[in-house]
Image: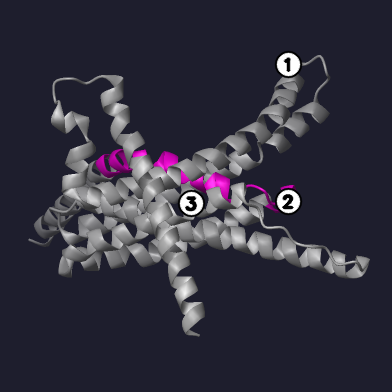
Amino acid sequence: MASVSLLTLLDDITTVLDDVALMSKLAAKKTSAVLGDDLALNAQQVSGVAAEREIPVVLAVAKGSFKNKLILVPTALLISAFAPWLIKPLLLIGGLYLCFEGIEKVLESLYPSSSHAPSDAKERIEEITCSLEEYEKKKVTGAIRTDFILSAEIIVIALGTVAQQELLVQLAVVSIVAVLMTVGVYGLVAGIVKLDDLGFYLKRKFDEQSWLSAIGQSLIVFAPKLMKALTVIGTLAMFLVGGGIVVHSFPALHNMIDPVAIEPIRKTLMNKLSPILLSGLIGAVTGLAVAGVKAGATKLKMKLW
């Protein structure tokens, strides 16, 4: 009798594991669209730091990302179980923040703030040291904050995939997707930011006539251009992800800009690209609107106080 019960238990465990594996694969496939935006955003967020500090910064952001998911996974499961109506408003707030952050980056690049340097050399050295520490801290904080929103979207998508499954399967699948996405994204980010170091290593290690040395030289030239491109792509991704969240929060707006829904037969490249481009445009306009509201609120606060 005991052996039969044990076999039944093992069979149940095997069934659950099969369900988890199948659902994890499906959830990972659905969240892979966000992975590209997540990668571009995080690579852009950690760019600009000193070469010897790149990996420590990536590790600090990855650690923050794991903490984000430790908060988000149980929170998402609780909200899904007891207050599912809260998911969309919370995602919308995150989307609005991404749009606003994207506009802030655009405005900062167009109107960089100028600061006067102190005349005393010692003060200048102290200021530079302090500024570098603050700059790095700001980069890490900003990347973790952005990661929180993207992680929330990934977890909600994964949770939606297993919404009809039992709680144990939901927990396992969402946790697996969260870990895989974090390791994947920050592993790739670490590889991207160290491409130039790999190039210098190949140049030093092999003779100039070697093809490996030529690859090293190509990486040295390519890496800075890639980082600049990722800075632009990361900002665009903020508008695309944020705008996409805003659009999906309002079904009427989503139906309005989706030509596939209007013309289901025509599946041209423009049909597929136009919803993405329009979502990005809506993201930029939304970011401007949020920035305007913030500026107005700041002026009103100054007048009142």
Q: Nearer the viewer, mark 3 or mark 2?
A: 3
In primary-sequence order, the first of circles 3 and 2 is: 2
In primary-sequence order, the first of circles 2 and 1 is: 2
Please state the total of marks drawn on the protein image: 3
Is residue 131 rendered to the left or right of residue 3? Answer: right
Residue 298 on image: x %, y %: 48, 72
Q: Residue beneath label 1, please?
A: 211
Q: Nearer the viewer, mark 1 or mark 3?
A: 3
Residue shown at the point (45%, 51%) measured from the top left: 182
Is 44 covered by the magenta stretch? yes
Q: Residue beneath label 3, please?
A: 103
Q: Which mark is residue 302?
A: none
Residue 62 on image: x %, y %: 52, 56
Mark 3 Cα within 10 Å, few/some/many (few <14, many 20+)? many
Gap between marks 2 and 1, in whole Å?
29 Å
Amino acid type shown at disc 2: Ala
Mark 1 Cα within 10 Å, few/some/many (few <14, many 20+)? few
Q: Nearer the viewer, mark 2 or mark 1?
A: 2
Q: What is the magenta segment's predominant secondary structure?
A: helix
Question: Label 2's element?
Answer: loop
Residue shown at the point (24%, 64%) measured from the top left: 77
Is residue 98 in sight in this rendering?
no
Amino acid type shown at disc 1: Trp
Q: As displayed, is residue 14 above or below residue 191?
A: below
Residue 289 or 195: which is nearer the viewer?
Answer: 289
Q: Residue beneath label 2, please?
A: 50
Residue 240 on image: x %, y %: 38, 42
In primary-sequence order, the first of circles 1 and 3 is: 3
From which residue to which does the magenta span run? 26-53
- The answer to whether mark 1 and mark 3 are in CB contact below 8 A is no
Is residue 45 rendered to the left or right of residue 211? Answer: left
Tell me the quarter of the picture where residue 297 sits.
bottom left
